[in-house]
Image: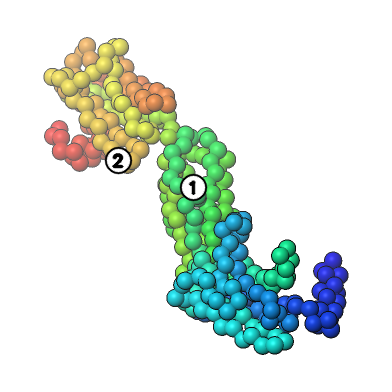
Amino acid sequence: MKNIYGVLLLLYITLAYSQKMPFISHTTHQLIRDIGSEVDLDCSTKHSREFNVLWIKVIKNQIDASIVLSSGSTLIVKDPRVSLVTEIKQDSSRYIIHINNIQEDDASTYRCDLITGFNNKISAYTELLVRGPPIIYDNSTKSLVVEEGQSVQLACFAGGYPTPHIFWRKPNNAILTMSNILKISAIKKEDHGNYYCIAENGVGKGTKRKISIEVEFAPVVTALQTVVGQAVNYDVYLECHVESNPPPAIIWIFNGVQLSNNENYLISDLATADDKIDSSLQIIKIKNYLYGDYICKAANILETAEITITVFETVLPQCPPFSIVSTRLHIGYNF
């Protein structure tokens, strides 16, 4: 098809030349330039002295917004970067649009129109491509808050010429995928954190965008010791570890009653990370009626979880576990 069009065009030019009909003999081919450089867009015509020639910047997908740059020997657009050079002769003419200090927005299709009648024109096109560093567009995914188990899709859209390559990675990690879409089929709490969309096209150093994912999950309650022994009139130290996001409400329960700080109990919570809390219960000089099952219970908007720690009587006093000693020293409690 292209060959047929080329043959027909050649036949038309040959006929027009022999009949001295106006036609466009040459236009600049596709041009590639760097930001800050300059370019000449050349439209040469034959037998067009009596006809008008227009240079038009064609805005893609916005036909009504196309801009007429020049008409004949008159530069219409007022821009200090743009100038017009014309060479009008009896049998041939040239209309050259010169663009200085090229910017990214100058990249477009440019059309040369030779107006031959009220409803007739001859057109030729050239394309200006502008090399520039990649730009990540604002319609890319921003920070997300999702529940554990959900399917997650992160999108990253970038522009620039040449077309950027896009890949994803986490801090100090290998590349996750080479695509503008990163999919996580069933996100886990370990998948939370920062993800980086990186776009590179060989121009400049490339660019990146940070996308933070916060994963909400139900509380998970564990304990190093679920059975603790102690002699009467000695302190007992119980501890449970809670992972949760959003942060949970943590309570201790004994015999169906929620405990609070008093002469028998001292409760303290220590956040060890954004989603981790150590909760400690100190039973002060335990009495016979305080032996039994203690429940550490954590709840957030998603769910509730708990663990039971049984306290029993021993003949000899027991030292608290090292982890509890370290925690108590860290927050300044005396034993």
SS type, badge 2: strand
Q: Which is in the foreground here, disc 1 or disc 2? A: 1
> What is the count of numbered marks?
2
Judging depth in this view, the residue of 266 and 106 nearest the camera is 106
Q: Residue at x 57, y 40 (%)?
A: 185
SS type, badge 1: loop
- Which residue is label 1 attached to? 141
**Horizontal placement of 175 versus 30: left or right?**
left
Residue kind at label 2, given as amino acid type: Thr
Rounded to the nearest angstrom, the CA distance separating label 1 from label 2 is 30 Å
Q: Residue at x 15, y 35 (%)?
A: 333
In the rendered image, the quadrant that contains the N terminus is bottom right
**Horizontal placement of 117 versus 145: left or right?**
right
**Residue 157 drawn at (x, y percent):** 54, 54
**Residue 324 drawn at (x, y percent):** 25, 35
- Residue 253 in view, yes or no: yes
Q: Are marks 1 and 2 in contact (CB under 8 Å)?
A: no
Q: Residue at x 25, y 32 (%)?
A: 269
Q: Give the answer, above or below, for where 276 lies relative to 112.
A: above
Residue 266, located in which quarter of the rendered image?
Answer: top left
**Residue 309 drawn at (x, y percent):** 33, 22
Residue kind at label 1, given as amino acid type: Thr
Instruction: Give the numbered dot on residue 272.
Output: 2
Q: Give the answer, above or below, for where 184 lies relative to 86.
A: above
Q: Give the answer, above or below, for where 48 lies relative to 65.
A: below
